[in-house]
Image (cartoon, helix red, strand yellow):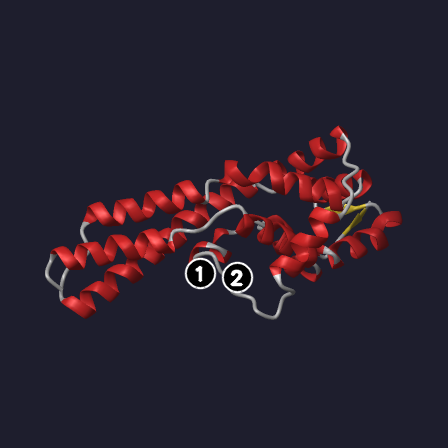
Amino acid sequence: MYTLDTGQVDHKLDGLQHLMSASLIVKTGKYCAFPSLRPAAFLLLVFFLTPIYTSADELDDAYRLLRITEVAREFEQATNQQTRNVIRTYASIVAMSTDRELPDSIKQQISNCYLETYAWEKFEPGIAAIFANNLSRAELKLMIDFFSDKSVPPPKIEQFKALIARADAIEQMAIDYMFSQTQGCDEQNVTLIMNFLSDQGS
C-alpha cells in the first residue's frame, strides 16, 4: 500500500471534501464569486442533457462518500458562520447610515431565511446524483477508500491523479446545482431592512 503525500493533493481534495461549503453561497447571496469559471447555465445544460445511467449501487456509494467526508457538518458550520457575517454586515450598514441598531427580530428573520434556504437536506439528493452520474463506481470506491485511510494502492495512483484533476469541474457542477435550487435571501433581507427604516422615519 502506497501512502500519498497528502500535501500534494490537498488543494484539490479540499474542493471535494468541502464541496458544499456555504461560504461560496451565503457570502454572496445567489451569485457565484468566481467569474473566471464557466457560466452556471452552460454547466447545468450539459448536466441535465447528459443521459443518466446511475445504478442504485453508485448512488449508495455517492451518499457514503458524502457521509465520510462530513459534508453535511462542514456545510452547516459554513452556513452558520456566513449567516453571522451577513447579519453583521447588514447591522453595520444600518448603524453607519442611520445611527440605529438593527433589531434582533429582523436579525432572526434573516438568519431563519438562510438556514431554511440553505438547509443541507434540500441539496443532498441532487449532489449525490451528480457524484453518481459523473464518477464510476470504481472511482467512488477509490475516493471512499482514500478518505477512510489516506492511502491509495500503487496500481491506482494514476487513476487517482486523473480523478483529482476532475475535482474542480465536479465541484462547480454541484455549486451550480445549488444555485439553481434557490432564489437566495437578498430580496427578503432588503425588504425587511427597508420596512424597518421606513417605520423609523429614515
Tell me which residue sits at (82%, 40%) in the image: 138
Q: Is residue 2 left or right of residue 149?
A: right
Looking at the image, the residue that sits furthest to the left is 201
Q: Quadrant of the C terminus?
A: bottom left
The correct choice, above or below, for 14 with respect to 98 in the image is above
Task: Identify the residue shown where x is 57% and y is 50%.
Answer: 18
Of the pair 92 and 161, the residue shown nearer to us: 92
Residue beneath disc 2 = 32
| Spot occupied by residue 107 in the image (x, y as percentages of width and height) | 26, 49
- Crowding at mark 2 (Cα within 10 Å: few <14, some 14-19, many 20+): some
Residue nearer the viewer, 194 or 106:
194
**Separation of disc 2 and disc 1 at Cα?**
7 Å
How far across and down, in percent of the image, does residue 152 sit?
Answer: 79, 47
Identity of the amino acid at label 1?
A: Thr
| Residue behind mark 1 | 28
Where is 111 relative to 91, above or below? above
Q: Amino acid at mark 2?
A: Cys
Residue at image coords 53%, 46%: 181
Q: Decide: marks 2, 1 in contact (CB < 8 A)? A: yes
